[in-house]
Image (cartoon, rainbow, N blue to C red):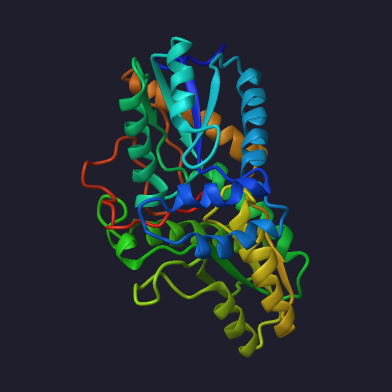
């Protein structure tokens, strides 16, 4: 029997976007930093991260792969919903996608955001993007957001397997460094309905991955939550420690190796392949510290099935049913609807590629 889709007649995949060729890099960075007064000279320096990879971010291709995987997963269970894709900062732009949805007669959709945790830039800013686009599009569809899914078994389970694989490549006794995008400390303080949600959710996810690995192996190991991709003026406090500084601490402590696990990211986009696979790997090599990086969920079957199941779950909830809401850890399932005061913006919020 096919799952029921009403009240939804479509699914929207909403992501950050990224340049597809060298000529896109500066306009893309101007989009990301609009209103912050950053000169083009500085943006060109940041753009070197992209130019070193041919001027193209992998994020759009990863979203295309995810769209294909979602379509196949939907078809497996007869979930007959079209899937659209829009971005915050590059084509296909969200407003254009919403115009397409309206022209196709879509009246109500559910949105999958490529961000698993609560914070302004990872949640509320996407909701603001949806509101802004709806104001520009006549007859725009109503769009509901899926709950935060970082502590869903499908997300955690994918990282359990990739972390186990990374550890298998390292000496016995290797540590685990769980990595996420740094954000201003003030943004974390107001993230989630009760504050500190960004850090609390990451710590809870890390604890669940660690516990499952210990259950499987009977081995305890050092674990830490660390950060990457800090930006902004140095006088503004951001979450620390930086992953590179942490690698130096591990080496000084005589740790025989480290699995770097990017639990803050759903795919291997620019901040993973540059900050971790390039910069952190260079730091580890300089220190003589064996390092292996765990894969992000990407199109892992557990992750894709989770997203499909969350669509079905949200549809059932909107029909007034009481669907099961799988989650692990101590924090309970994420909320369907955010409070109006949840994750308020800072004066100049810092955008991230897909936090």
Q: Quadrant of residue 73?
A: top right
Which quarter of the figure has residue 51?
A: bottom right
Nearest the eye: 22 or 294:
22
Number of marks present in the image shown: 0
Looking at the image, residue 88 lies above or below residue 106: below
Query: In the picture provided, is 285 more to the left or to the right than 244?
Result: right
175 and 324: which one is in front?
175
* Residue in front for this viewpoint, 347 or 149: 347
The x, y position of residue 135, in whole percent, is 30, 26
For the question of whether residue 21 can be seen, the reply is: yes
* Residue 80 coordinates in the image, percent (x, y): 56, 13
**In the image, what residue occupies the spot 65% across and 71% down?**
280
Who's the residue at 65% across and 33% down the image? Answer: 64
Does residue 118 appear anywhere in the picture? no
> Residue lying furthest left in this view?
341
Residue under the image location 44 percent in, 23 percent down: 98
Q: Nearer the viewer, residue 115 or 175?
A: 115
323 sits to left or right of 219: left
Name the quarter where the N terminus is drawn: top right
Question: Residue placed at 74% from the left, 78% from the top?
Answer: 285
* Residue 190 vertical position relative to residue 308 in the rendered view, above or below: below
Q: Is residue 42 above or below residue 244?
A: above
The percent coordinates of residue 14 (x first, y second) are 49, 35
Q: Please provide percent x and percent y for residue 189.
A: 29, 62
């Amino acid at each position: 029997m096919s799952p029921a889709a009403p009240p939804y007649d479509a699914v929207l995949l909403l992501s950050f976007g990224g340049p597809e060729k060298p000529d896109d890099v500066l306009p893309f960075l101007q989009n990301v930093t609009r209103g912050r007064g950053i000169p083009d000279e500085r943006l060109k320096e940041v753009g070197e991260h992209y130019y070193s990879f041919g001027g193209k971010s992998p994020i759009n291709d990863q979203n295309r792969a995810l769209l294909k995987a979602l379509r196949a997963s939907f078809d497996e269970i007869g979930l007959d919903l079209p899937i659209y894709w829009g971005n915050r900062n590059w084509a296909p732009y969200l407003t254009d996608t919403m115009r397409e949805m309206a022209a196709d007669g879509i009246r109500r959709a559910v949105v999958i955001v490529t961000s698993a945790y609560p914070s302004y830039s990872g949640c509320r800013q996407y909701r603001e993007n949806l509101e802004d686009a709806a104001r520009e599009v006549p007859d725009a569809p109503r769009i509901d957001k899926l709950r935060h899914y970082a502590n869903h078994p499908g997300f955690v389970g994918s990282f359990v397997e990739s972390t186990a694989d990374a550890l298998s490549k390292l000496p016995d006794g290797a540590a685990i460094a769980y990595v996420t995008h740094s954000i201003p400390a003030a943004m974390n303080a107001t993230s989630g309905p009760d504050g500190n949600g960004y850090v609390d959710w990451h710590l809870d996810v890390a604890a669940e991955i660690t516990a499952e690995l210990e259950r499987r192996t009977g081995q305890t190991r050092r674990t830490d939550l660390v950060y990457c991709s800090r930006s902004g003026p140095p006088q503004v406090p951001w979450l620390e420690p930086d992953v590179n500084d942490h690698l130096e601490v591990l080496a000084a402590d005589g740790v025989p190796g480290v699995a770097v696990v990017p639990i803050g990211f759903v795919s291997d986009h620019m901040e993973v392949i540059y900050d971790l696979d390039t910069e952190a790997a260079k730091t580890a090599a300089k220190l003589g510290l064996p390092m292996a990086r765990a894969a992000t969920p990407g199109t892992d079957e557990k992750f894709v099935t989770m997203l499909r199941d969350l669509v079905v779950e949200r549809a059932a909830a909107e029909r007034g049913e009481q669907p099961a809401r799988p989650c692990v850890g101590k924090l309970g399932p994420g909320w369907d609807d955010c409070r109006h005061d949840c994750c308020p913006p800072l004066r100049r919020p810092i955008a991230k590629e897909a936090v």
